[in-house]
Every structure is written in C-alpha cells, then in structure tokens.
Amino acid sequence: MASAPSRTAPGSWWSRRLIVTEDQRAVPFSVETAFADGRTVKSVTFVVDENPSPVAAVFHMGPGRDRVALSSRFRVNAQTDVRVIVEASDGALYMSSQLVKFAGGQAACAAPPTGDEKEIAANMGKMKLADVPSSSARSEINHKVRLALSHPNHTGMQLDQLTLLYIPLRMVNRVDARLGSEHVFSMDGSITLSESPVIEFDYRLGGGDKLDVDMTDTTGAAWHKSFPLGPAS
C-alpha cells in the first residue's frame, strides 16, 4: 500500500509500502525515498502511533544520499496509524501515514520472548549479512543488503513464563553501519523494534571493500562485526 506525502516539493518523490502479517511481533515496514533537486536525505523516522514507544526507529543517513531504501520489522500493539517521516538536508519534512488493521492477538510489546533463555543469551550480538536481489536499474549505483541482528530486544513489559516476574528492559539502542570510511547510517532503536531485528538498506557501490557494523544495547553491551564485500562493492 502507498499514500501520498503530506507535503510535496518540486523535484522530489518518495513512497512507502507497508505489508501487514499475522504476527504482530514482527510487522515489516519499508520506505523508498529520493530527491532530484540537489537535496539529500538527512533522516528517516518510523512511527507507530498507538505503541507504548511510538518512535520505532530513527535512521540518520550518511552524507550525499539523494536516494535511500530502508526496511525493518516492528512490534505493533494494536490497530494504529503508522507513519514514515523523511527529513531533507534543508530541514523540510515529508510524511506518509497508513492505518494498520489486524484481528485480535496479544499486545506485541508484552508478548513473551520466543526461544530458550540460554540459547538467546548464547546468540546475543551475532550478526548476519545477505544480499537482497534487485532487477532495477538503480542497482547499478546502489546495492541492497539484509542485516540480521540477534538480540531479544526485551521491552520491560514481558513476563517470564516460569517466574511470572517482568523481564528487565534490554533493548537495542544504537546500530551504526560504515562502508570503509563512509558513514552509511546510524539507527536509534526502541522497544518497538522486533525481537532479533532485521534491517534492509542500500548503499552506494564503490565505497569500500568491507561493511563495519556496531550494535549497542541499554545495558552498555556492545558488539562489532566486519563483513567483507565483493570487488564491485
């Protein structure tokens, strides 16, 4: 689904697509945005109005990005409007919104974590990177990848099913991606991010031969992973 931005500007276009699944704990959202008038994308913000933490994620983009494609998975607590807000390099803001509906279910932010506690702890901080195939012409300039992060992203509202005590808040609060010396994006996260967040993003080809990713959470824990890229990357 797509809707027009609340504010338009000459020489720019952008659109957002939303796919709603049956799993409220990991609903995929995506945005593609571009300016053709010399401006660039400064930031992209995802907002889920009715969630306890409405600002799901803020992506601060690296310099010179006149085109950006992003997607991630978020918890959606109830029927709600969802929004994507794009900030241009001149400070102008553009927004698209969509009402999301689904049938019943437990509030996603309070849903218990999946998997064994020991397994979750053992895998915490692991990262995987995979190519996202694209047949569009813009793939000759930009390349898209899928970054999978292993982290429970505990919301502080979930009950341990054995002790019936609340699981302490432990969420991903920052993800930084760099291509060589080039800043690709920095993401400020929240409890609205899904468990084991997945981020799809594009980057400009020719920027370097490795992608460095750093992740931190609210306990102060930090993880780093360096992904080698092909010669055309």
Image (cartoon, rainbow, N blue to C red):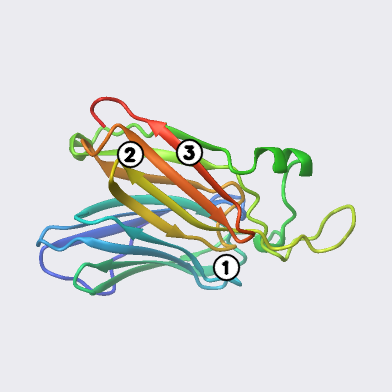
Q: Between residues 15 and 102, which one lies in front from this camera angle?
A: 15
Residue 160 screen position, x and y as percent:
82, 56
Callout 2 touching callout 3 (CB < 8 Å): no
Callout 1 touching callout 2 (CB < 8 Å): no
Residue beneath label 3, please? 225
Mark identifier at residue 224: none
Residue beneath label 2, please? 144
> Mark 1 and mark 3: span between their CA atoms?
37 Å
First along the sequence among labels 2 and 3 = 2
Residue 59 screen position, x and y as percent:
38, 59
> Mark 2 and mark 3: span between their CA atoms?
18 Å
Left or right placement of residue 93 versus residue 161 in this view: left
Callout 1 touching callout 3 (CB < 8 Å): no
Number of numbered callouts drawn: 3
Please tell me whether mark 1 or mark 2 is closer to you in this view: 2
| Vertical relation: 85 (above or below) 203 | below
- Report the amino acid beneath label 2: Lys
Residue beneath label 1, please? 79
Residue 223 screen position, x and y as percent:
54, 45
Q: Check disc 1: other Cα within 10 Å, few if <14, some if 14-19, many if 20+.
A: some
Instruction: Please identify the quadrant where the N terminus is shown.
Output: bottom left
First along the sequence among labels 1 and 3 = 1
Please tell me whether mark 2 or mark 3 is closer to you in this view: 3
- Report the amino acid beneath label 3: Lys
Q: Between residues 17 and 60, which one lies in front from this camera angle?
A: 60
